[in-house]
């Protein structure tokens, strides 16, 4: 009798976790990329060059620069957990070096990952295809709204610099 319950528990567990396998593989691959970047000192090189670009600028310009960097990275890495796993170990020391708070680094990551998903074709093309909306119509609709959001992101990043001194 117990053997039947064990088999049922195992089958239920396997069935319920099947949908997560793809996501877990992406997280695992991302972690592998991060380990390679750290062990090969690639992330140190990236931190050095990013901080050298942003160092010496005002904190506001640095925060806005980090925001645009995150937006550009989101074009290539659309998954939020993957982007966080790859960029935050780089952006955190950059923020420390250029004297920005870590909260500001996280905020610009969230802005860079979240709002640009509706703009970059690597993120919105599938949704437009599923809904039957031509991509050019989508861009005519979303471009003005996205511009407003970018302006608001810049303002909130600047406010973050003021709040987290």
Image: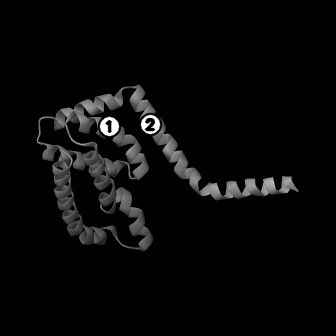
Q: Is residue 103 above or below residue 97?
A: below
Residue at horizontal 33 percent and vertical 54 percent from the top: 113
Farthest-out residue, right: 1
Percent x, y for residue 73?
31, 47
- Quarter of the view holding residue 148: bottom left
Q: Quadrant of the N terminus?
A: bottom right
- Quarter of the view holding residue 119: bottom left
Residue at horizontal 18 percent and vertical 48 percent from the top: 161
Residue at horizontal 34 percent and vertical 32 percent from the top: 43
Q: How is the image coloured?
A: one colour
The answer to whether marks 2 and 1 mark residues whose Cβ atoms lie closer than 8 Å is: no
Percent x, y for residue 32?
48, 36
Residue 120 seen by the camera: no
Tell us which disc is closer to us: 2 or 1: 1
- Which residue is identified by label 1? 90
Q: Which mark is residue 8?
A: none
Does dot 1 land on a helix, a strand or a loop?
helix
Percent x, y for residue 128?
38, 68
Q: Which mark is residue 33?
A: 2
Residue at horizontal 24 percent and vertical 43 percent from the top: 101
């Amino acid at each position: 009798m117990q053997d039947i319950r064990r088999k049922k528990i195992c089958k239920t567990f396997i069935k319920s976790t099947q949908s997560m396998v793809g996501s877990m593989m992406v997280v695992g691959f991302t972690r592998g990329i991060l380990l390679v970047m750290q062990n090969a000192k690639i992330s140190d090189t990236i931190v050095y060059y990013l901080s050298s670009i942003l160092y010496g600028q005002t904190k506001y310009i640095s925060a806005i620069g980090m925001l645009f960097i995150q937006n550009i990275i989101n074009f290539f890495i659309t998954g939020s957990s993957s982007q966080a796993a790859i960029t935050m170990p780089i952006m955190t020391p950059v923020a420390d070096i250029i004297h920005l708070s870590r909260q500001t680094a996280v905020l610009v990551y969230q802005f860079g990952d979240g709002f640009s998903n509706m703009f970059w074709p690597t993120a919105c093309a599938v949704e437009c295809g599923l809904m039957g909306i031509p991509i050019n119509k989508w861009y005519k609709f979303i471009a003005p709204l996205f511009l407003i959001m970018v302006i608001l992101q810049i303002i909130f990043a600047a406010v973050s610099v003021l709040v987290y001194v």
